[in-house]
Image (tube, rainbow, N blue to C red):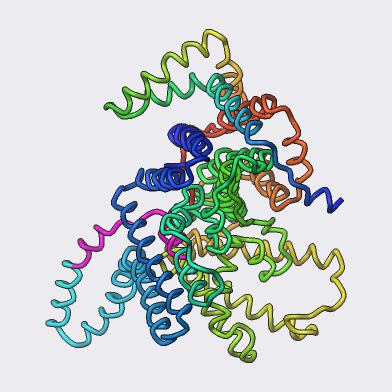
Amino acid sequence: MEANKDKKQGVPLTHAWTALLVFYVVALALNAAALHRNNERLPYGPVRSFWVAVSAPISAVSQALHADRPRAVLEKTVGASLNKN
Amino acid sequence: MLFPTTVFAVFFFLVYNLHWMLVGYPRVRKVVLLAASLFFYGFWSWRFALLLLASAILNHIAAVHLERLAVANRGERTRRRLVIFAVAANLALLGVFKYTGFFFGDFLFPLLRPICVAIGPNAVQWLVHAQETTYPLLARIVLPVGISFFTFQALSYVLDVYRRETPPARTWLDFANYLAFFPQLVAGPIVRASHLVPQMERMPSREMPIDVGRATFLILSGLFKKIVVANWLATHLADPVFSWPEIYSGPDILLAVYAYAVQIYCDFSAYSDIAIGTGLLMGFNFPLNFNAPYFASSLQDFWRRWHISLSTWLRDYLYIPLGGSRRGTKRTYVNLLVTFLLGGLWHGAAWTFVLWGAFHGAYLTVERIVRGWWGGGASSKSAPASPWRVWLGRIWIFHVVCFSWILFRGGNLDTVKAMLQGLWNWRSVVPTVAFWNAWPLAVVLVGFAMQFFDGDRLWRVWHRLAAWPSWALGATAAVVLTIILALGPEGVAPFIYFQF
């Protein structure tokens, strides 16, 4: 068993890179609406304008695909109950 | 730049891709890595990024000169002077930014007040004038984030080269990358030069296997600990009670102290986990920094499990050079006290941190004495203790550490006193305030249980994760991240250890 523990657990770089890319795409799809909401709350200025311009179309696509629903449901149920004052 | 933010996510994606695309151009790759680290640090203030660069230049020049003198086998006295200068310069940097305010505001002026009153009105007038001119200057000193961490790394590098335990980095760029590497720059782990400089010199190759299972697990568990557990415990339990302990009952104060113990563990170990995880994705390996600290059965054991990189640093560069346990019993106790007093002061410039360090040093001394009475001394190899004794020891040490967290978190002696007095009040002065219900207990217990993830206890899970198809691993990680974000409160609180 100890021998197994010492074995290299690594994977090739391409495997790690693909996993990271999929992670970013799926995470963006699932959280785009919340991200856009956060960006809209930034103080007015060029930084806000940039981030809102970037996140708006992604959020629109995410909403059209209903990818924002799981997070919204979780936030309304468990999240709201957990974080109420 | 904070880890759990969109800005960091974008930053990391770009740096990760550049880092692996530039494998064929090692020098450019190192320059890009340093530029990325400076950008990460400069996000707080570009002036502090210049300070970090200056520290890298000074320490590398000192290390190279120390090595040259050693190779020439001459000038031992010059080597000694040079290392003293380098250590003094590093400590001066830390002193100016971190301890000037404490020295004047909490030490010198309070000390001078009764003396000036005794001398007479002219002395009082002089002191008032001195305070009026000094305080506005002190208010302008801003503490660079993570200065204690990178200064300790720089010190360990210079001292290791002086002791001939490690050679200086091949190039300044390698050393600068070691000192400024963004995942662990701001809140550790404090990595030794002998561990990270060789990795910076040879840089990870494309053929190198990436420990993606462990990295994913560490990053996600770190985000959960920080975003869900630590933030919740801070806003709902620890912060309200520590800011106004007078209105809470004893049981609520006790729960808030437990909550703070779990909060600081989840907050700090989360940073270490995310740092180790991002380092692994980029092909770098960092040492372990936490190993289930609240399962320790003695305070000595606790310090082998809590902030391991700091406790080993203090042991190797302070306790052992002071003589360690080699110069008799009394000297050992003095060395322990000095080490922990300075360890406390490292955490922050306030008397409560000094008290916290003194408490740990004193308790470790008592623990050593008691262990000596029970037979065998510090290095006893007697029969293992029975399970019930181990568990009693764990519960006792957890409460000892919880008591010390009151000193640590209190901020000032009035709050510490109010917290300790409040522990004995059965009822709150405000009857509607009561914390002992399902959510607080559940979050404290979940945070406490996160210690089972420390060390390599879950290596089988890392193995299994690494064996998943890449798309499944990426998609699952994204779903878990979404759950974490949905459960966490809005906004991101900075990590506690940023202030140190």
Q: Is residue B244 visible?
A: no
In this view, the residue in front, B56 or B93, is: B56
In this view, the residue in front, B285 or B7, is: B285
* Above/below status of B124 relative to B353: below
* Above/below status of B92 relative to B466: below
Q: Report the span colored magenta.
A: B134-152
Q: Quadrant of residue B210?
A: top right
Q: For the view shown, which residue lies furthest in the top direction? A: A64
In this view, the residue in front, B321 or A74, is: B321
Q: Return the x and y of residue B288 as percentages of the image width and height.
A: 64, 56
Q: Return the x and y of residue B132 as percentages of the image width and height.
A: 17, 67
Q: Is residue B135 magenta?
A: yes
Q: Is residue B79 magenta?
A: no
Task: Please state if B152 lies on the left or on the right of B211 as rendered.
Answer: left
Task: Please state if B429 lies on the left or on the right of B454 as rendered.
Answer: left
Number of marks present in the image shown: 0
* Above/below status of A26 relative to B369: above
Q: Return the x and y of residue B35 as percentages of the image width and height.
A: 39, 45
Position of the C terminus of chain B by quadrant: bottom left
Query: Residue shown at 30%/69% (left/top)?
Result: B105
Position of the N terminus of chain B by quadrant: top left
Task: Please state if A68 lies on the left or on the right of B110 as rendered.
Answer: right
Q: Is residue B37 visible?
A: yes
In this view, the residue in front, B280 or B338, is: B280
Query: Residue shown at 35%/46% (left/top)?
Result: B42
Task: Please state if B256 lies on the left or on the right of B155 as rendered.
Answer: right
Secondary structure, magenta segment, majority class: helix
Q: Return the x and y of residue A36 as percentages of the image width and height.
A: 43, 21
Query: Residue shown at 73%/51% (left/top)?
Result: B456
